[in-house]
Image (tube, helix red, strand yellow):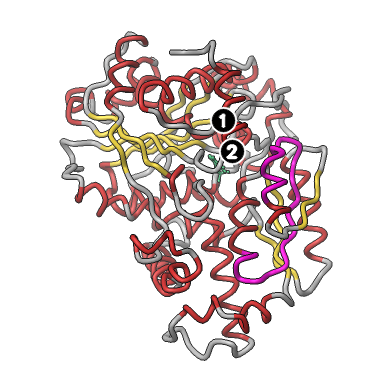
C-alpha cells in the first residue's frame, strides 16, 4: 500500500467505521446509468446470451447425468419464494416497516451442488470441457447432442486432464462435483475456513483435497502455482475468471422471466431491490450485471459482507480494488460466514462493477447468526451463514441515514410501497444434518 490508511480514512470517513469493525451502509457514488456503465466495459448482453446458449447446449448432458434436473429439462435454476412470515416478524422486531414484498431467491436449492457457485463454477467447467472436446475432435461441432458428454469415451478422454481450484469450500464443491462427473482429475486447495464435511464430501467423490492453514487468497495462490506447472491442468481462478462471471450473469438475467411468471412488475414506479452476499465478488457482480441488463435503472443492487471481511467495500470505497485488503484495516478474523471469508476482492470484478452496484453494507457475525435462526424458525428454511446476509438488506436500506439518502437521491421514497425486495439465498441445502444442528445450536441465542 502506497497510501497510508489514515489518508484513505481522511478522504472517506466511513472507512473509519469499517476499521473499527462497525456495521455500515454505503452508497456507491461512482454508480452510472446502466447503458453508460455497460459501454465502459468490454462486456455486453451478447456475453450473457453466449453463456445461456452454452448452458442450453449442455442441458441434455445435465439431464442425463443428473436425472433430478429432468423437471427443468437439464437447466440449473432455482425457485423464488415469498417469505412473508419472516418479513412480518422483522417488521415488528426491528421497528422498521418494510413495505412492498420480500422474497428469497432459493439458490440454496440449486440442483447438483446447492449453492450459488453452481451457476459460475459449473458453467466454467462445462465451457472448458466443450473447448477441450472441440479442440481434440471428440466433438465435431456445437450442433451435436451434448448427451455424449455423459458417455464412457468422453469420461476416459477427460481423465487425462486436471482441473484445479482454490476455495473456502463451496467453489470446490461445485467444480469438484461437475469435474468428476465429466471424468476429470480434480484438485481442490482449501483455505482454513473450509468445513470438514466439505473436504469429506469431495474426497468421497474422488477429488484430491489439499488443506491449507492459511486464508483464501493464499490457498488460491498455491492452487494456481501448482496448476500452472502442469500443462494438462486448468485452473478455475476465482480472482480473475471471466467465465465464472459470465456463468453468474445468466442467473441475474433470468430473473426477468421469473418475475414475470410470478406476476411481479418492475418499472419506474415499481422498483426492484436485490441484496447479494459477497465474498470475492464474482457471484454478486455477475448477477448484478445480468440484472442490470434485464432491468436497467429499475433494479438497485446491493452487496453484503461480514464486518470482519469487508473486502469489496474497502476495494470500492478506496478505489484501490484488489490492491487493498481487509488486513490493511487490521480486520480479517474468522467469521461465521465462511463462504464470504475473502480478505481481498477480485480486481476484475471490483473494477468492472464499480459503476453498477448501488452500494453495499456490512453485518456483524451476531446478525448472521440471528438471521440464520430466525429464517429457520419463521420459514423452516435452513440457510448456511453466508447465505442469510441479504435478508437484512431492506431494513438497513430503510433505517440507515445513508440508505435514506439513497432513496431520496433516486426519488424512491414515495414508491417503496410498490417495491420488490429479493434477498439472494446463496446456499444451504447441502449442509449435512449434523452440521445444521451445530449451526442452529450455536446461533440459538441470537433470535431477531
Ligand atoms: C461463494 C459464496 C458467496 C459469495 O460469492 P463470491 O463470488 O465469492 O462473492 C455467497 N454465498 C455463498 C454460500 C457462497 O458459497
Q: Quadrant of the N terminus?
A: top right
Question: Label 2 vs label 1: CA separation?
Answer: 6 Å
Q: Does the magenta segment cover residue 189?
A: yes
Q: Quick check: is the Cβ at mark 2 less than 8 Å away from ligand 1? A: no
The range drawn in magenta is 179-201
CB atoms of marks 2 and 1 within 8 Å? yes
- What residue is drawn where x is 53% and y is 33%? 384
Ligand 1, by image quadrant, is: top right
- What residue is drawn where x is 16% and y is 44%? 263
Foreground residue, 421 or 241? 421
Q: Would you identify the image quadrant in which residue 22 lies?
A: top right
Q: Is residue 140 left or right of residue 273?
A: right
Q: Quadrant of the C terminus?
A: top left
Q: Position of residue 440 (x, y in %)?
A: 55, 22
- Label annotation for residue 436: 1
- Label annotation for residue 200: none
Q: Position of residue 232 (x, y in %)?
A: 76, 74
The residue carrying mark 2 is 432
Regarding mark 2 in the picture, which secondary structure is present there? loop
- What residue is drawn where x is 48% and y is 40%? 426
Q: Is residue 42 left or right of residue 439?
A: left
Q: Position of residue 321 (x, y in %)?
A: 61, 41
Amino acid at each position: 500500500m502506497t497510501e497510508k490508511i489514515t489518508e484513505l480514512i481522511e478522504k472517506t470517513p466511513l472507512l473509519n467505521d469499517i476499521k473499527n469493525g462497525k456495521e455500515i451502509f454505503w452508497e456507491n457514488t461512482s454508480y452510472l446509468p446502466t447503458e453508460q456503465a455497460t459501454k465502459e466495459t468490454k462486456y455486453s448482453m451478447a456475453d450473457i446470451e453466449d453463456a445461456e446458449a452454452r448452458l442450453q447446449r449442455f442441458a441434455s448432458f445435465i439431464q442425463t447425468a443428473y436425472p433430478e434436473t429432468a423437471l427443468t429439462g437439464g437447466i440449473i435454476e432455482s425457485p423464488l419464494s415469498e417469505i412473508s412470515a419472516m418479513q412480518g416478524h422483522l417488521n415488528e422486531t426491528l421497528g422498521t416497516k418494510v413495505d412492498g414484498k420480500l422474497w428469497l431467491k432459493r439458490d440454496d436449492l440449486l440442483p447438483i451442488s446447492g449453492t450459488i457457485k453452481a451457476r459460475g463454477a459449473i458453467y466454467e467447467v462445462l465451457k472448458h470441457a466443450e473447448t477441450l472436446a472441440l479442440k481434440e475432435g471428440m466433438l465435431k461441432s456445437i450442433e451435436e447432442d451434448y448427451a455424449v458428454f455423459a458417455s464412457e469415451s468422453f469420461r476416459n478422454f477427460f481423465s487425462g486432464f486436471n482441473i484445479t481450484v482454490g476455495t473456502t469450500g463451496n467453489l470446490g464443491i461445485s467444480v469438484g462435483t461437475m469435474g468428476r462427473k465429466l471424468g476429470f482429475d480434480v484438485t481442490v486447495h482449501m483455505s482454513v475456513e473450509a468445513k470438514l464435511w466439505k473436504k469429506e464430501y469431495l474426497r468421497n467423490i474422488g477429488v484430491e483435497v489439499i488443506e491449507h492453514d492459511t486464508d483464501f487468497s493464499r490457498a488460491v495462490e498455491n492452487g494456481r502455482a501448482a496448476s500452472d506447472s502442469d500443462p494438462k491442468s486448468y485452473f478455475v481462478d476465482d480472482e480473475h475468471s471471466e467465465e465464472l462471471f459470465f456463468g453468474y450473469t445468466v442467473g441475474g438475467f433470468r430473473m426477468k422471466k421469473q418475475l414475470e411468471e410470478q406476476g411481479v412488475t418492475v418499472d419506474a414506479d415499481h422498483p426492484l431491490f436485490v441484496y447479494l452476499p459477497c465474498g470475492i465478488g464474482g457471484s454478486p457482480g455477475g448477477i448484478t450485471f445480468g440484472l442490470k441488463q434485464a432491468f436497467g435503472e429499475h433494479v438497485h443492487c446491493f452487496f453484503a459482507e461480514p464486518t470482519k471481511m469487508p473486502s469489496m467495500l474497502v476495494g470500492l470505497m478506496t478505489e484501490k480494488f484488489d490492491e487493498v485488503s481487509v488486513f490493511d484495516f487490521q480486520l480479517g478474523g474468522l467469521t461465521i460466514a465462511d463462504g464470504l471469508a475473502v480478505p481481498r476482492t477480485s480486481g476484475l470484478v471490483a473494477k468492472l462493477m464499480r459503476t453498477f452496484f448501488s452500494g453495499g453494507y456490512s453485518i456483524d457475525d451476531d446478525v448472521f447468526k440471528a438471521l440464520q435462526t430466525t429464517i429457520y424458525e419463521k420459514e423452516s428454511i435452513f440457510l448456511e451463514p453466508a447465505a442469510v446476509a441479504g435478508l437484512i438488506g431492506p431494513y438497513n436500506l430503510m433505517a440507515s441515514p445513508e440508505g435514506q439518502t439513497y432513496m431520496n437521491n433516486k426519488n424512491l421514497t414515495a414508491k417503496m410501497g410498490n417495491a420488490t425486495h429479493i434477498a439472494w439465498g446463496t446456499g444451504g441445502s447441502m449442509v449435512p444434518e449434523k452440521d445444521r444442528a451445530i449451526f442452529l445450536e450455536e446461533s440459538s441465542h441470537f433470535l431477531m
